[in-house]
Image: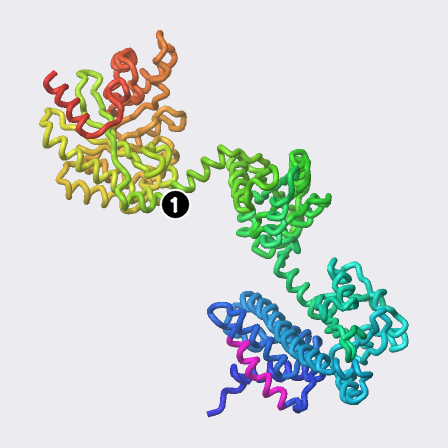
Amino acid sequence: MSAEPDGPEDRLRRFATIWSRAVFPVTSTSATRPEFEQQLLPLARRLSEALKARTYDADEAKAVGAALVSVHCTDPEALSRTLDCVDAYLVLYCGEDGVQEDLRARAARLQHAMAAGFAQALRERTLAEQEAIAQAALQAQGVVAQALHATEARFRAVFEGAAIGIGMADLEGNVLQVNGALLRMFGVSEQTMRDRNVMEWTHAEDAPQTWKLYEELVRGDREHYHTEKAFHRPDGTVLWTNLTVSLLRDADGNPQYQLALMEDTTERRLLNLRLRYEATHDALTGLPNRTFFFERLEKALGAGKGQRFGLCYLDLDGFKTINDSLGHAAGDRLLVEVADRLQSCATAPGEMVARLGGDEFVALTTGPDTEREVDELAARIMNAMVAPISVDGRELTVRGSIGIVEGPAGERSPAEVLRSADITMYRAKSAGGNRFELADPEADARAITRHGLTTALPTALDRGEFFIEYQPLVHLGDGSVRGAEALVRWLHPQHGVLGPDRFIPLAEHTGLIVPLGRWVLEQSVRQAREWRERHDAAVPMRINVNLSPCQLTHPGLVQDTVDILERMGVEPDALCLEVTESALIGADDDLLKPLRRLAEMGVDIALDDFGTGYSNLANLRRLPVSILKLDRSFTQSMQQFPADPVDLKIVEGIVSLAHSLNLAVTVEGVETGAQAEQLRILGCDTAQGWYYARPGPPERLHELALVDATG
């Protein structure tokens, strides 16, 4: 059954037809154009499949490039026309099922891989031909040494018909014979070539050992040598060659002639340079990319004694907002303008600018005095960012945060330097952005430690590295223990016992705070049950558990709490959940709904760190709290005697207001008996602090409760 009109197979054949028409005129083949088209059809099919494959496969495109050589498309123009066809028509005829932007990016990568495969196959074919010619020339050495009598015609056929350049000279460097290929490579006549001496063919790009090898050969100390060499052409261009020079001896073994075989590698070299440029430069901005930058940085760090380096790591502030609001095209134009400005800042010797990716750029300076130069470089970059950038008729103000690392060469690896710069840059961004900061080894160490803790957190809970300490809550009226606050600790394998201030913010950032908080709640409720079973008091002991803002917004908060209380057989009034005052700033009804449901069940809700200046006291009526927990700053102000009367009035007013709203008042940070007495006089209900007990194991709280009971 034939394919539908204009189906995928028809479109593929149309692409193959266009390709064959473009390339056939520069192809050395005995096939007709339709026959040549049939040879290209399977290659077109492989390109189409590679374009639409789930994952990019460079080897498939390289194979297509190599296959071009096998069908006699060896002229560099054939490659150029092939790449133009792929660029213009591959996505048009073979990419109807994909996203055009993604397919065009994939097509560009296929072109690069095809060029690499073509260059490799052409080189292998040329080397094979060169080897055959070299073998033929070496086999003819004996005949040439005998004045070329018996095999003159045979050697002449090889000599003139070879595709590579061949020349013969005496040991003084006088040119004796050259073939047509060599004349075409240099673009000169035979007489012009004969008038020149080999010693005149020097070039600034010659490797240091090139002429030393030549001198050894004409002395007879070596039989041949191979090198890459450049030559000047009369038109001012440069001819690059793979040069093999062999020594020809006479019948007695004495050196007599030198034979040169030259392969023209100019086009391949230009292609390699192009591919190298694309591999080491950012396609959008033209700046050196991460690969190139790391090469330069590694070289700078490996410099000799007395050399230093300075690095500025720049990240644009608010670039994501520009991308999200104006689109990625506008963001790209902004990055191009930023790159141009940065390039103008690093023009001195030893300076360079690179784009690492996204909106991250680096500037590097090297030399003996980078301590001063890197600061000046950072200042120039900040000044270059001041003027607004016009994008699509909008004037955009762009700012950046810079982390600076400077030091002597030879002490750190590139990865260590970049990590320090990255940490420092984020420190500048955290300080408000639009500024630069100098690297601080201590700050780096803290950041690295923080990162290590972050990565270790997910498995720490599974390994049972967390434990809970309890600090008693004491009634200020009769001194009885009314409960305790549960305080989670991390027994880290390397850092020892870590307090919550070291890992709770990290847990909130990673989302681990929800399972960790659930574990703390479960362990604390279980402990409350044990206390109530062991200590039968008139007023049952209560456990206080802290809730983070992440837990507060988690949809499973109420159900998790109910499940834990029911599973442990504990009444809701044994539990108090503490929520910081800052977490409830501007809280709407949706945020307060879970707390209201828990309060209706009988769970106490405490407003922690109250009095830090955020809450509107009038809003206390709408919050489902039953306890105000005063911030420890109030108790600290009472350490001096006499206490500040203004602070006392503030506390007295808060306590009076709380009691009028039927709220109990708890104070933290009580460290002396004088503080406890003053707070009792002011009407506070319960307190906790080192005056009563430091946080400790649950057994200590039970002992304190027994002491209070036996009074």
Q: Does 555 appear above or below 644?
A: below
Q: Quadrant of residue 411?
A: top right
- Number of residues whose C-alpha sits closer than 10 Å to that of mark 1, classed few (under 14), some (14–19) or many (20 or more): few
Between 148 and 340, the residue placed more toward the observer is 148
Between 499 and 611, the residue placed more toward the observer is 499
Q: Look at 21% across and 40% down and name the residue there.
A: 522
Residue 247 in magenta? no
In the image, taking residue 420 as reference, residue 232 lies left or right, namely right
- Residue 395 at x, y = what percent? 65, 46
Which residue is the site of mark 1?
A: 455
- Residue 247 at x, y = what percent? 76, 73
Q: Which residues are magenta?
A: 35-49
Secondary structure beneath dot 1 equals: helix
Between 375 and 248, the residue placed more toward the observer is 248
- Residue 318 at x, y = what percent? 55, 44
Q: Look at 82% across and 78% down and name the residue there.
A: 178
| Residue lying furthest top | 642
Q: Look at 19% across and 27% down and name the residue there.
A: 483
In the image, taking residue 576 as reference, residue 226 lies left or right, namely right
The answer to whether any part of residue 507 appears in the image is yes
| Residue lying furthest front | 252
Q: Amino acid at mark 1?
A: Thr
Q: Main secondary structure of the magenta part?
A: helix
Between 464 and 41, the residue placed more toward the observer is 464
In the image, taking residue 445 as reference, residue 167 lies left or right, namely right
